[in-house]
Each structure stands twice: as structure tokens, then as C-alpha cells.
Amino acid sequence: METGKSSASWGKPLPTLYQLEEKCVKDYRKYSDTVAVSFAIYHLFSKNPEIASYIGIEHQLKNEEGRDVCPDLVATYESDRKGLVFELKWSLPFEDELLEKELKKLRRYAIPCSNWRKPSDRVDFHDLILICHIDDAQRAIEMIKKISADVEYNFLGNEGFAVWSWTITAPKMGERKEELRLFPVYGKTRNQEIESLVNQPGGIMFPEDVLTFLRFSFTFVKQKPPIQYLMTVLIQNIFPTFQQKPDRDFYEIHVDMIYERAKTFFPAWHKYNAETIQIKRGWIREALEILWKLKLCEKVLGKTDWWRILIPTVRTMKPVQLALCRKISREYLKSLKKRRPRGRLRVRPIRPKGPRKEKPLNDFF
């Protein structure tokens, strides 16, 4: 969604509130689905070690260039002689230049690495799998084909690199349960067990009971969530735990208090000396700033990082994320209207322009 001066210029209609809300909710769901996908893979290896032996989430490897790299998920197969590296992206840039830059970053994962289970551990070779949303898959594949012509990035066109995507079917009352399916869209790995599973009709399927467990246990992936996602997590899971009275009231809470409580609900993953925290202090501060702009909390004057939170923060009959997206979208639309030029329309020569670019809805904050 375009932001800035051009969005509000003459000759371009402003987006509707419905369009803004739809984009906001879609980004929320894309991140939520990415979390489910990440831990569906973890679940697959945990329950089927003959396919691959799970090592860890954000396990730290060291590549031959001396860089520490932390892919989203790491595993080995064939008695730890070969490796698997997964990198998940809930969203990829729309601008070609930024998309190319993002995909070129995958090179750091393709370089031979050590520290698979111990610092001295190496493997014969490892495969790299990029998992992205189906909305981004075709653009990613086209860019991969382009940059793989460069010898420095030819690993993108070789066996051992693959792109996967996913679908999550919406449940229907009495007819169909929710399912997650993983399927390949480009390339292939050298793990025959995985290739056999992912290329079967319908891909790799995870039933509703598995998804329910994963969503209850895990909330974040390494990539920063959209702001509406984090705000929803704070409002639904964290803020209510500070309430001491049965009726609605304000509570003064420090960022560190929220952070420590969040760690209790979403603890670190600890595997083979690799430890990661699901939630970050910076994310919390940013979410609180947006809640303040939406008049859903207050700053405590004269006290840094102290906030006055109304609990419950949002009263709505709808899911919290839908209510937040409505508020965010309204504020965004107001900001666009304020930047819209006033006065008479000046006729300017029409110049050809490239495809419209999208940016995150919360950029205007």
C-alpha cells in the first residue's frame, strides 16, 4: 500500500477504509500462518526423526567466511552427514531492488558451515529451503531465476535449493476442518524422504489438532511481526495478567514488566546451546507507541518506559485483530487525507510510471 506524498496526490483515488482493513488483516494472517508453518516443520522432524534430525530453531551456525548465521530452523539427515536449513519469510518486498537484495542475503546460508551440533561439526553438504507466502512466490521465483545467472548466486539455480509455499484451508462448520499443507514451487532438495513427502498430491498435510497445538505453544518467528499482530498478542495474552480487580481499571506498567511476563508466556527455545527469545523489548515499545497514538493507552509523565494501560484495553464483540485493524486503518486514512493537496487541480503532463508498490500499513506511524 503506497504511502507518502504520491498516495495523496491529485488524480489518484485514496484507498477505501475497507481496502486498508483488508490489507491489515491479511498481513496479520500471513504472519500467523508463517508461525504455524515454522513449527509444523519442527513437529514433522520431532515426530519423524528418520526423515531428518531436528537441531534447533535459530540455531547458530558459522559459515566459512567467519560469519555467524541463524536460519529459522536447522536439521541434519543421513546420520548427521548432511544438513537442512530453512528460512521463512512471512512477507517479501514488492520493490524489485529490495526483493533482489533480500534474496541475495540467502547466500550467507548457502556457504559451507560448522557448528551443526558442536562447534567442530561439519556436514558433507547442506540444502537450503526458502518458505514464503504464495502471494510472494511467483515474484520471488522470477527474481531468483534472474540473479542465479550471477556466478556468486548460482546456488539458487542448483540442486539443493528449493522454494516452498503453503495453504491453510479455512474450516467450515460440520464440513471441513482446518488443514495446513506445504508444497514445492521451485527447485528441489537432496533429501529423498522430504522430496517424496512434499511432492505427493496435496503436499505435506498437517491436521487441525496439530495446528491447534502449535498455535497454542508458539507465537513468533525470527522475522519481526506486523505491528497489529504484536498489539493483538499484548492485548489478548499479556495485559490481562496484570489485572487485580474484577472491574475495568488502569494499571501502570513498565516495559520490562511486560517483557518478563511475555517471556513466561512465550519462553525461549533452547536446543544444543542455541537460545532465542520469542519477543523483543523494541517490539513492545513500538506496539505501545502505536496504542498510544490510537488512544488505547497513556504515557506516564516523567517516567521513561512507564505506561498506563486500560484493562481490558479494547472492548469489542469482534476478534481483537479486526478491531485494531479498523482503528489503524482509520488513522492511516486520516493521515492520507491531511496530506492531500488543496486548491485547484493543476494539469501536468502524464508520464509513464512503473507498477504500484505496496508498503506496510503502519509505515505512517
Image (cartoon, rainbow, N blue to C red):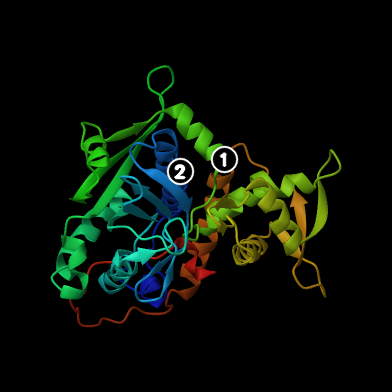
Residue 274 in the image: above or below residue 64: above
Q: Residues within 10 Å of mark 1 (few under 14, many from 20)?
A: some
What residue is shown with label 2?
39
Residue 12 in the image: above or below residue 166: below
Residue 325 in the image: above or below residue 332: above
Q: Between residues 240 and 323, which one lies in front from this camera angle?
A: 240
Q: Residue at x 63, y 49 (%)?
A: 267
Res. 65 image quadrant: bottom left
Q: Amino acid at mark 1?
A: Ser
Could you tell me residue 10's position as x and y percent? 34, 74
Q: Amino acid at mark 2?
A: Phe
Q: Is residue 212 left or right of residue 45?
A: right
Could you tell me residue 138's position as x and y percent? 21, 55
Q: Which mark is residue 169?
A: none
Quadrant showing the N terminus: bottom left
What residue is shown with label 1?
217
Q: CA distance from mark 1 to mark 2?
A: 9 Å
